[in-house]
Image: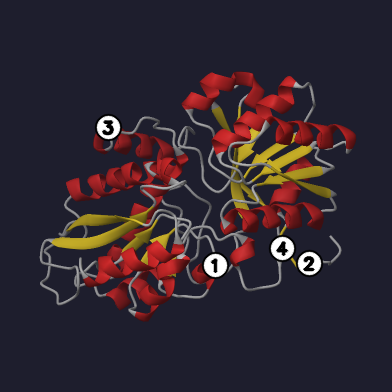
Amino acid sequence: MASSASSCNTPGVSRNEVRIGLVYPDSGALARTFQPVRSGLNARLGVVNESGGVHGRQIHYTWSDDRGRADTNAVVSRGLVEKDHAFAVIEATAASSGGAGYLAAENVPVVGIGTDAAWSRYRNMFTYALPSSATPAAEVVTTLGAYAREQGGSRALVVGDPAGLHITDDIAEQMRASFVSVRIPTLSANADESPTDSQIREIIRLIRTEQVDTLASTLTTDTFARIVAAVRQAGVPLKVILSGSQPPGDDLLREYGPLLAGLTTYLIISPDSASPSAAAYRAATARFAPELDDSLSVLAETGYLLGDMFVRGLEASGPCPTRQSFITGLRAVKNYTAGGLIPTVDFERDFGRAPVCYPFTAVNATGTDLVLVSPNFCGERVTPGSAH
Protein backbone atom coordinates (compact mmCIF):
# COMPACT_ATOMS: atom_id res chain seq x y z
CA MET A 1 0.00 0.00 0.00
CA ALA A 2 2.95 2.29 0.62
CA SER A 3 4.64 4.10 -2.24
CA SER A 4 6.69 7.23 -2.80
CA ALA A 5 4.46 10.10 -1.69
CA SER A 6 4.06 13.08 -3.98
CA SER A 7 3.89 16.68 -2.82
CA CYS A 8 0.32 17.87 -3.46
CA ASN A 9 -1.47 21.17 -3.10
CA THR A 10 -4.66 19.87 -1.50
CA PRO A 11 -6.10 20.86 1.90
CA GLY A 12 -5.20 18.27 4.52
CA VAL A 13 -2.65 16.52 2.31
CA SER A 14 1.10 16.85 2.88
CA ARG A 15 3.99 14.77 1.65
CA ASN A 16 3.71 12.32 4.56
CA GLU A 17 0.19 12.73 5.94
CA VAL A 18 -3.52 12.99 5.14
CA ARG A 19 -5.50 14.85 7.79
CA ILE A 20 -9.21 14.08 8.15
CA GLY A 21 -12.00 15.02 10.54
CA LEU A 22 -14.30 12.84 12.64
CA VAL A 23 -17.69 14.04 13.89
CA TYR A 24 -19.55 11.99 16.50
CA PRO A 25 -21.53 12.56 19.72
CA ASP A 26 -18.99 12.42 22.55
CA SER A 27 -21.56 13.95 24.91
CA GLY A 28 -25.34 14.03 25.12
CA ALA A 29 -27.91 11.25 25.00
CA LEU A 30 -26.13 9.28 22.27
CA ALA A 31 -22.61 9.45 23.68
CA ARG A 32 -22.59 6.02 25.28
CA THR A 33 -23.86 4.44 22.07
CA PHE A 34 -21.40 6.10 19.69
CA GLN A 35 -18.19 6.36 21.72
CA PRO A 36 -16.88 2.91 20.60
CA VAL A 37 -16.74 4.27 17.03
CA ARG A 38 -13.41 5.94 17.76
CA SER A 39 -11.85 2.69 18.93
CA GLY A 40 -12.83 0.96 15.71
CA LEU A 41 -11.54 3.83 13.61
CA ASN A 42 -8.26 3.81 15.54
CA ALA A 43 -7.93 0.09 14.84
CA ARG A 44 -8.40 0.41 11.07
CA LEU A 45 -6.11 3.43 10.74
CA GLY A 46 -3.57 1.74 13.01
CA VAL A 47 -3.36 -1.21 10.62
CA VAL A 48 -2.95 0.92 7.49
CA ASN A 49 -0.47 3.33 9.09
CA GLU A 50 1.68 0.47 10.37
CA SER A 51 1.88 -0.87 6.81
CA GLY A 52 3.14 2.48 5.51
CA GLY A 53 -0.09 4.37 4.94
CA VAL A 54 -1.74 4.98 1.58
CA HIS A 55 0.62 6.09 -1.19
CA GLY A 56 3.21 6.66 1.54
CA ARG A 57 1.01 8.93 3.67
CA GLN A 58 -0.12 8.26 7.22
CA ILE A 59 -3.77 8.99 8.01
CA HIS A 60 -4.53 11.01 11.15
CA TYR A 61 -7.72 12.64 12.33
CA THR A 62 -9.06 15.45 14.48
CA TRP A 63 -12.40 14.81 16.18
CA SER A 64 -15.29 17.06 17.15
CA ASP A 65 -18.35 16.46 19.34
CA ASP A 66 -21.71 17.30 17.74
CA ARG A 67 -23.71 16.12 20.82
CA GLY A 68 -26.05 14.30 18.42
CA ARG A 69 -27.58 17.65 17.38
CA ALA A 70 -27.92 18.88 13.81
CA ASP A 71 -27.21 22.52 14.70
CA THR A 72 -23.99 21.58 16.49
CA ASN A 73 -23.07 19.24 13.65
CA ALA A 74 -23.24 22.16 11.22
CA VAL A 75 -20.83 24.20 13.35
CA VAL A 76 -18.24 21.48 14.01
CA SER A 77 -18.28 20.17 10.43
CA ARG A 78 -17.45 23.65 9.17
CA GLY A 79 -14.75 24.02 11.83
CA LEU A 80 -13.00 20.80 10.79
CA VAL A 81 -12.75 22.08 7.22
CA GLU A 82 -12.04 25.77 7.76
CA LYS A 83 -9.92 25.68 10.94
CA ASP A 84 -8.39 22.20 10.86
CA HIS A 85 -8.16 21.98 7.05
CA ALA A 86 -9.48 18.42 6.95
CA PHE A 87 -9.22 16.70 3.58
CA ALA A 88 -12.37 14.67 4.28
CA VAL A 89 -14.86 14.13 7.11
CA ILE A 90 -16.17 10.95 8.72
CA GLU A 91 -19.71 11.49 10.06
CA ALA A 92 -20.33 8.84 12.74
CA THR A 93 -23.50 10.45 14.04
CA ALA A 94 -27.26 10.51 13.67
CA ALA A 95 -27.15 14.30 13.08
CA SER A 96 -25.10 14.49 9.87
CA SER A 97 -27.83 16.48 8.09
CA GLY A 98 -26.66 19.58 9.96
CA GLY A 99 -23.38 20.00 8.07
CA ALA A 100 -24.28 18.08 4.90
CA GLY A 101 -25.15 21.09 2.75
CA TYR A 102 -21.98 22.96 3.65
CA LEU A 103 -19.72 19.94 3.06
CA ALA A 104 -21.39 19.32 -0.30
CA ALA A 105 -20.96 22.95 -1.35
CA GLU A 106 -17.24 22.72 -0.47
CA ASN A 107 -16.95 19.36 -2.29
CA VAL A 108 -15.51 17.72 0.84
CA PRO A 109 -15.61 13.91 0.76
CA VAL A 110 -17.80 12.46 3.52
CA VAL A 111 -18.06 8.83 4.62
CA GLY A 112 -20.40 7.89 7.42
CA ILE A 113 -23.54 6.32 8.81
CA GLY A 114 -26.42 7.05 6.43
CA THR A 115 -29.35 8.36 8.44
CA ASP A 116 -31.39 10.72 6.29
CA ALA A 117 -32.09 12.00 2.79
CA ALA A 118 -28.83 13.98 2.62
CA TRP A 119 -27.03 10.68 1.94
CA SER A 120 -29.14 10.17 -1.18
CA ARG A 121 -28.89 13.80 -2.30
CA TYR A 122 -25.20 14.75 -2.15
CA ARG A 123 -22.73 12.77 -4.26
CA ASN A 124 -19.79 13.68 -2.03
CA MET A 125 -21.37 11.51 0.71
CA PHE A 126 -20.75 7.77 0.95
CA THR A 127 -22.44 5.24 3.21
CA TYR A 128 -22.70 1.46 3.28
CA ALA A 129 -26.42 1.14 4.04
CA LEU A 130 -29.18 3.69 3.58
CA PRO A 131 -32.55 3.24 5.31
CA SER A 132 -35.38 3.13 2.79
CA SER A 133 -37.03 6.02 4.66
CA ALA A 134 -34.07 8.21 3.60
CA THR A 135 -34.40 7.46 -0.11
CA PRO A 136 -36.28 9.72 -2.50
CA ALA A 137 -37.93 6.88 -4.41
CA ALA A 138 -41.44 5.77 -3.50
CA GLU A 139 -40.46 2.19 -2.79
CA VAL A 140 -40.36 -0.23 0.12
CA VAL A 141 -37.69 -2.86 0.78
CA THR A 142 -39.34 -6.14 1.75
CA THR A 143 -36.27 -7.70 3.42
CA LEU A 144 -37.24 -7.29 7.08
CA GLY A 145 -40.75 -8.55 6.43
CA ALA A 146 -39.54 -11.44 4.29
CA TYR A 147 -37.08 -12.47 7.01
CA ALA A 148 -39.82 -12.34 9.67
CA ARG A 149 -42.15 -14.35 7.44
CA GLU A 150 -39.48 -17.00 6.83
CA GLN A 151 -39.00 -17.32 10.60
CA GLY A 152 -42.73 -17.95 11.09
CA GLY A 153 -43.84 -14.42 11.91
CA SER A 154 -47.46 -13.58 11.11
CA ARG A 155 -48.38 -10.51 13.22
CA ALA A 156 -45.97 -7.75 14.28
CA LEU A 157 -45.63 -5.08 16.94
CA VAL A 158 -43.12 -2.25 16.33
CA VAL A 159 -42.00 -0.40 19.45
CA GLY A 160 -40.61 3.12 19.01
CA ASP A 161 -39.67 6.11 21.13
CA PRO A 162 -41.90 9.12 20.34
CA ALA A 163 -39.54 11.46 22.19
CA GLY A 164 -36.43 10.11 20.48
CA LEU A 165 -34.50 11.14 17.39
CA HIS A 166 -36.23 11.59 14.04
CA ILE A 167 -34.01 8.84 12.62
CA THR A 168 -35.63 6.29 14.95
CA ASP A 169 -39.04 7.30 13.60
CA ASP A 170 -37.75 6.71 10.07
CA ILE A 171 -36.44 3.25 10.93
CA ALA A 172 -39.71 2.35 12.68
CA GLU A 173 -41.62 3.34 9.55
CA GLN A 174 -39.21 1.28 7.46
CA MET A 175 -39.92 -1.74 9.65
CA ARG A 176 -43.69 -1.27 9.51
CA ALA A 177 -43.71 -0.81 5.74
CA SER A 178 -41.54 -3.89 5.23
CA PHE A 179 -43.84 -6.06 7.35
CA VAL A 180 -46.96 -4.76 5.61
CA SER A 181 -45.35 -5.35 2.18
CA VAL A 182 -45.42 -9.10 2.84
CA ARG A 183 -48.88 -8.94 4.39
CA ILE A 184 -47.90 -9.16 8.04
CA PRO A 185 -50.45 -7.07 9.99
CA THR A 186 -48.52 -4.55 12.08
CA LEU A 187 -49.30 -2.68 15.30
CA SER A 188 -47.34 0.09 17.01
CA ALA A 189 -46.44 0.86 20.62
CA ASN A 190 -44.30 3.46 22.36
CA ALA A 191 -41.69 3.27 25.10
CA ASP A 192 -39.17 5.71 26.49
CA GLU A 193 -35.46 4.96 26.41
CA SER A 194 -35.95 4.43 30.14
CA PRO A 195 -39.26 2.58 29.83
CA THR A 196 -41.76 2.74 32.64
CA ASP A 197 -43.28 -0.40 34.10
CA SER A 198 -46.66 0.62 32.67
CA GLN A 199 -45.18 0.91 29.17
CA ILE A 200 -43.69 -2.56 29.43
CA ARG A 201 -46.99 -3.95 30.76
CA GLU A 202 -48.83 -2.39 27.80
CA ILE A 203 -46.41 -4.01 25.34
CA ILE A 204 -46.99 -7.39 26.98
CA ARG A 205 -50.76 -6.83 26.94
CA LEU A 206 -50.71 -5.99 23.20
CA ILE A 207 -48.64 -9.06 22.39
CA ARG A 208 -51.06 -11.27 24.28
CA THR A 209 -54.39 -9.80 23.19
CA GLU A 210 -53.43 -9.16 19.56
CA GLN A 211 -51.67 -12.51 19.12
CA VAL A 212 -48.40 -10.87 18.14
CA ASP A 213 -45.53 -13.24 17.37
CA THR A 214 -43.04 -10.70 15.93
CA LEU A 215 -41.58 -7.96 18.14
CA ALA A 216 -39.48 -5.25 16.49
CA SER A 217 -37.97 -2.06 17.86
CA THR A 218 -35.88 1.01 17.07
CA LEU A 219 -34.91 1.53 20.71
CA THR A 220 -31.32 1.26 21.89
CA THR A 221 -30.04 -2.24 22.54
CA ASP A 222 -30.01 -1.79 26.31
CA THR A 223 -33.66 -0.69 26.39
CA PHE A 224 -34.94 -3.30 23.97
CA ALA A 225 -33.09 -6.03 25.87
CA ARG A 226 -34.91 -5.02 29.03
CA ILE A 227 -38.28 -5.15 27.24
CA VAL A 228 -37.54 -8.51 25.59
CA ALA A 229 -36.47 -9.97 28.94
CA ALA A 230 -39.70 -8.75 30.56
CA VAL A 231 -41.80 -10.26 27.76
CA ARG A 232 -40.02 -13.57 28.16
CA GLN A 233 -40.39 -13.51 31.94
CA ALA A 234 -44.11 -12.98 31.44
CA GLY A 235 -44.20 -16.26 29.51
CA VAL A 236 -45.27 -14.68 26.23
CA PRO A 237 -44.02 -16.68 23.20
CA LEU A 238 -42.40 -14.91 20.26
CA LYS A 239 -41.17 -16.29 16.94
CA VAL A 240 -39.24 -13.22 15.75
CA ILE A 241 -37.44 -10.49 17.74
CA LEU A 242 -35.90 -7.86 15.48
CA SER A 243 -33.82 -4.86 16.59
CA GLY A 244 -32.87 -1.86 14.45
CA SER A 245 -29.94 -1.20 16.79
CA GLN A 246 -26.65 -3.02 17.40
CA PRO A 247 -26.46 -6.58 18.75
CA PRO A 248 -26.27 -6.97 22.54
CA GLY A 249 -22.75 -6.94 23.92
CA ASP A 250 -21.13 -9.16 26.48
CA ASP A 251 -22.58 -7.22 29.41
CA LEU A 252 -26.19 -7.66 28.29
CA LEU A 253 -25.68 -11.35 27.49
CA ARG A 254 -24.33 -11.88 31.00
CA GLU A 255 -27.21 -9.93 32.54
CA TYR A 256 -30.11 -11.54 30.67
CA GLY A 257 -28.73 -14.79 29.23
CA PRO A 258 -31.33 -17.01 27.53
CA LEU A 259 -34.04 -14.36 27.97
CA LEU A 260 -32.47 -12.69 24.91
CA ALA A 261 -32.31 -15.86 22.81
CA GLY A 262 -33.32 -15.11 19.23
CA LEU A 263 -32.92 -11.33 19.46
CA THR A 264 -31.85 -10.53 15.92
CA THR A 265 -30.08 -7.54 14.36
CA TYR A 266 -29.08 -6.64 10.83
CA LEU A 267 -26.93 -4.17 8.77
CA ILE A 268 -23.49 -5.47 9.66
CA ILE A 269 -21.93 -8.88 10.22
CA SER A 270 -21.28 -9.51 13.90
CA PRO A 271 -17.62 -9.06 14.91
CA ASP A 272 -17.99 -12.37 16.75
CA SER A 273 -18.57 -14.32 13.54
CA ALA A 274 -16.09 -16.91 12.28
CA SER A 275 -15.42 -15.00 9.05
CA PRO A 276 -11.82 -13.96 8.21
CA SER A 277 -12.93 -10.32 8.04
CA ALA A 278 -14.30 -10.44 11.59
CA ALA A 279 -11.09 -12.12 12.77
CA ALA A 280 -9.04 -9.33 11.15
CA TYR A 281 -11.21 -6.77 12.92
CA ARG A 282 -10.74 -8.45 16.31
CA ALA A 283 -6.96 -8.63 15.79
CA ALA A 284 -6.84 -4.95 14.85
CA THR A 285 -8.81 -3.82 17.90
CA ALA A 286 -6.69 -5.96 20.21
CA ARG A 287 -3.57 -4.31 18.85
CA PHE A 288 -4.61 -0.72 18.25
CA ALA A 289 -7.67 -0.17 20.49
CA PRO A 290 -6.85 -1.86 23.82
CA GLU A 291 -9.17 0.59 25.59
CA LEU A 292 -12.21 -1.05 23.98
CA ASP A 293 -14.23 -2.67 26.76
CA ASP A 294 -16.33 -4.82 24.46
CA SER A 295 -14.48 -6.15 21.43
CA LEU A 296 -17.81 -7.33 20.04
CA SER A 297 -19.25 -3.80 19.91
CA VAL A 298 -20.88 -3.32 16.52
CA LEU A 299 -20.43 0.46 16.84
CA ALA A 300 -16.70 -0.11 17.16
CA GLU A 301 -16.90 -2.33 14.10
CA THR A 302 -18.79 0.48 12.36
CA GLY A 303 -15.89 2.84 13.11
CA TYR A 304 -13.53 0.25 11.63
CA LEU A 305 -15.75 -0.01 8.55
CA LEU A 306 -15.88 3.77 8.06
CA GLY A 307 -12.10 3.89 8.32
CA ASP A 308 -11.88 1.14 5.71
CA MET A 309 -14.19 3.08 3.38
CA PHE A 310 -11.94 6.11 3.68
CA VAL A 311 -8.82 4.04 3.01
CA ARG A 312 -10.47 2.55 -0.09
CA GLY A 313 -11.37 6.00 -1.39
CA LEU A 314 -7.87 7.30 -0.77
CA GLU A 315 -6.40 4.33 -2.62
CA ALA A 316 -8.70 5.07 -5.55
CA SER A 317 -7.81 8.77 -5.63
CA GLY A 318 -4.24 8.20 -6.79
CA PRO A 319 -0.77 9.23 -5.55
CA CYS A 320 -1.66 12.94 -5.46
CA PRO A 321 -5.20 12.94 -4.05
CA THR A 322 -7.66 15.75 -4.45
CA ARG A 323 -11.11 15.93 -2.96
CA GLN A 324 -12.64 15.45 -6.39
CA SER A 325 -10.41 12.49 -7.28
CA PHE A 326 -11.42 10.84 -3.98
CA ILE A 327 -15.13 11.34 -4.74
CA THR A 328 -14.77 10.16 -8.34
CA GLY A 329 -12.57 7.22 -7.37
CA LEU A 330 -14.73 5.89 -4.54
CA ARG A 331 -17.95 6.40 -6.51
CA ALA A 332 -16.53 4.09 -9.18
CA VAL A 333 -15.79 1.27 -6.71
CA LYS A 334 -17.94 -1.83 -7.21
CA ASN A 335 -18.24 -5.00 -5.13
CA TYR A 336 -17.11 -3.27 -1.93
CA THR A 337 -17.53 -5.46 1.17
CA ALA A 338 -14.93 -4.02 3.60
CA GLY A 339 -13.15 -7.35 3.32
CA GLY A 340 -16.35 -9.27 3.98
CA LEU A 341 -17.92 -7.28 6.83
CA ILE A 342 -20.96 -6.13 4.83
CA PRO A 343 -22.97 -7.30 1.82
CA THR A 344 -21.68 -6.00 -1.52
CA VAL A 345 -21.97 -2.28 -2.21
CA ASP A 346 -21.64 -0.61 -5.62
CA PHE A 347 -21.20 3.07 -4.74
CA GLU A 348 -22.58 4.28 -8.08
CA ARG A 349 -25.41 1.82 -8.64
CA ASP A 350 -26.53 1.90 -5.01
CA PHE A 351 -26.35 5.68 -4.51
CA GLY A 352 -29.62 6.92 -3.03
CA ARG A 353 -31.06 3.42 -2.73
CA ALA A 354 -31.68 1.29 0.32
CA PRO A 355 -30.02 -2.13 0.27
CA VAL A 356 -32.18 -5.17 -0.35
CA CYS A 357 -29.74 -7.60 1.28
CA TYR A 358 -28.66 -7.65 4.93
CA PRO A 359 -26.73 -9.95 7.26
CA PHE A 360 -28.90 -11.19 10.14
CA THR A 361 -27.21 -11.99 13.46
CA ALA A 362 -29.06 -13.50 16.44
CA VAL A 363 -28.41 -14.34 20.08
CA ASN A 364 -28.01 -18.11 20.43
CA ALA A 365 -30.40 -20.37 22.36
CA THR A 366 -28.41 -20.19 25.60
CA GLY A 367 -27.98 -16.42 25.45
CA THR A 368 -24.20 -16.71 25.63
CA ASP A 369 -23.11 -15.73 22.13
CA LEU A 370 -24.13 -14.37 18.74
CA VAL A 371 -24.65 -16.51 15.65
CA LEU A 372 -24.78 -15.45 12.01
CA VAL A 373 -28.20 -16.61 10.80
CA SER A 374 -27.71 -15.36 7.25
CA PRO A 375 -24.77 -13.37 5.83
CA ASN A 376 -26.78 -12.03 2.91
CA PHE A 377 -30.57 -12.35 3.22
CA CYS A 378 -32.29 -10.53 0.35
CA GLY A 379 -35.74 -9.14 -0.28
CA GLU A 380 -36.80 -6.82 -3.07
CA ARG A 381 -37.96 -3.28 -3.76
CA VAL A 382 -41.69 -2.81 -4.26
CA THR A 383 -43.99 0.14 -4.76
CA PRO A 384 -46.19 0.76 -1.68
CA GLY A 385 -49.63 -0.72 -2.15
CA SER A 386 -48.57 -3.18 -4.84
CA ALA A 387 -49.46 -6.84 -4.42
CA HIS A 388 -46.67 -9.10 -3.17
* Quarter of the image where the N terminus is located: bottom left
Which residue matches tag 4?
A: 140
* Quarter of the image where the C terminus is located: bottom right
Which residue matches tag 3?
A: 290
Is there CB contact under 8 Å for labels 3 and 1? no
Give how far apart the Cα atoms at labels 2 and 3 are: 47 Å
Residue 382 image offset from top left, x and y in percent: 75, 65
Give how far apart the Cα atoms at labels 4 and 3 are: 41 Å
Q: Amino acid at mark 3?
A: Pro
The residue located at (64%, 63%) in the rendering is: 133
Q: Earlier in the sequence, mark 2 or mark 3?
A: 3
Is there CB contact under 8 Å for labels 2 and 1? no
Q: Quadrant of residue 60?
A: bottom left
Q: Quadrant of residue 57?
A: bottom left
Is residue 1 visible in the rendered image? The answer is no
Is there CB contact under 8 Å for labels 2 and 4? yes
The residue located at (81%, 37%) in the rendering is: 152
Which residue matches tag 1?
A: 350
Q: Earlier in the sequence, mark 4 or mark 1?
A: 4
For label 3, the SS is loop
Left or right relative to 328: residue 14: left
Residue 162 image offset from top left, x and y in percent: 65, 51
Which residue matches tag 2?
A: 384
Q: Amino acid at mark 2?
A: Pro
